[in-house]
Image (tube, rainbow, N blue to C red):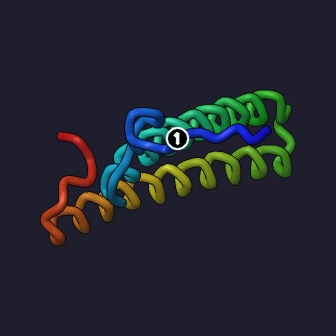
Amino acid sequence: MVYALDISSGNFAPAKFANIASFINIILPMMMIGASLVFLAMILYGGFSWITAGGNPENVSKAQKIFINAIIGLVIVVFGFVITKVIGYILNVQILPQ
């Protein structure tokens, strides 16, 4: 016995995104939230490392490197957002919702 399924638009939901702009509209906000959570975690860890350094210059410099890396990561995420908006403006495509 063979079981078959009729594949039509009534059986399956349509795709959530039809082009690359709608795909970016879904993915980019989630990535920005994730990046901000990682930034927050790094800042908290750097602060904890600094507090528990006990005046040891080596541990203080490690904590400062954690702060610097967190800020650099946040700057990269912000520039990525700005570049995405500029590309959307140049191509006349609404990539991110207003």
Q: Where is residue 17 in the image (x, y as percent from the top left)?
A: 37, 48
Image-quadrant location for residue 15:
top left
Q: Position of residue 48 (x, y in %)?
A: 75, 29
Report helix, strand or loop for mark 1: loop
Residues 14 and 71: in front is 14
Residues 17 and 38: in front is 17
Residues 50 and 56: in front is 50
Question: How many residues crowd mark 1 within 10 Å: few (<14), some (14–19), many (20+)?
Answer: few
Q: Where is residue 39 in the image (x, y as percent from the top left)?
A: 58, 40
Q: What's the residue type where badge 1 is placed?
A: Asp
Judge whether 93 appears above or below 90 on screen: above
- Residue at 38% x, 60% y: name it: 79
- Residue at 86% x, 42% y: name it: 56
In the displayed structure image, the side of residue 80 where residue 31 appears, left or right: right
Q: Position of residue 87 (x, y in %)?
A: 25, 68
- Residue at 17% x, 40% y: name it: 98
Give the residue number, with chain letter if any, for mark 1. 6
The number of discs equals 1
Image-quadrant location for residue 13:
top left
**Looking at the figure, which quarter contains the N terminus?**
top right
In the displayed structure image, the side of residue 84 where residue 1 appears, left or right: right
Residues 64 and 85: in front is 85
Residue at the extreme bottom of the image, as rendered: 90
Residue at the extreme front of the image, as rendered: 1
In the displayed structure image, the side of residue 73 where residue 61 appears, left or right: right
- Residue at 72% x, 33% y: name it: 45
